[in-house]
Amino acid sequence: MKIKKRRYITSPCASAVRLIRKKYPHLEKYLAYKVDSPMVATAKVVHHKWPDAKVVFIGPCIVKRLEASEDHPDLDILVLTYKELNEVLNIVHPDEAIPVEQLFDLENSSTRLYPISGGLATTSCSSHLLSRDEIQVISGWKKCAEALDNFEKNTSVRLLDILFCDGGCINGPGIESMLTLEERRNKILGYIEQRKI
């Protein structure tokens, strides 16, 4: 069964959403706005379960700061990049590990695909609803701009899944890593497989 011929642009990426808002406002009607980004959804869960907790998002993206401060100031999210976290840990050395029972993690390991190009399309099970030709997965700012320039003309694409950084968030500017992009991708995929056991 195929769903109605509606078309969507989906992205958990604050940079991609901002690009559309600023440079392609005519495409905003296609954005899947009713769905929170993983950062925002997680912050809401944390506030619900632990109302007095301070939410800290640690990731590779500097634009998440704008998403937190401008789009969701009510959630009071502190955003740090991995580089900044390393700087903090060079100054402050935590002397005890967090007990396993206090770790906060989601049950479904497939949600960890979001930082990889095509992760949202895979996690959303869109391949069960749409044909391969109806799904376009794009990463990298040049390819994003090209796909957005052509989105209204290319009506065969019903789901455009975009991430601003080439390869996805695993190649964001706030990452310090000696690993190649492919090695980072494989690490995430390996972690997902390990969590399925």
Image: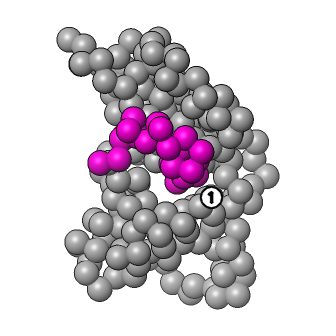
Residue 187 locus on image (x, y percent): 60, 43
| Residue closer to the observer: 100 or 2 | 2
Q: Magenta includes 140?
A: no
**Local crowd at mark 1 within 10 Å, few (<14), some, or many (≥20)?**
many
Circle count: 1
User: Is residue 193 at all visible to an observer of this figure?
Assistant: no
Q: Is residue 44 above or below residue 189?
A: below
- The residue beneath circle 1 is 60
| Residue closer to the observer: 180 or 161 | 161
User: Is residue 65 at all visible to an observer of this figure?
Assistant: yes
Magenta segment, prevailing SS (helix, strand or loop): helix
On-image quarter of the N terminus: top left
Image quarter for residue 196? top left
Q: Is residue 107 above or below residue 133?
A: below
Three-letter amino acid code at disc 1? Pro
Residue at 29% x, 86% y is: 52
On-image quarter of the C terminus: top left
Outermost residue toward the front in this view: 26
Residue at 40% x, 21% y is: 158
Q: Magenta includes 33?
A: yes
Residue at 67% x, 52% y is: 172
Q: Magenta region: which residues?
A: 13-34
Residue 110 locus on image (x, y percent): 39, 40
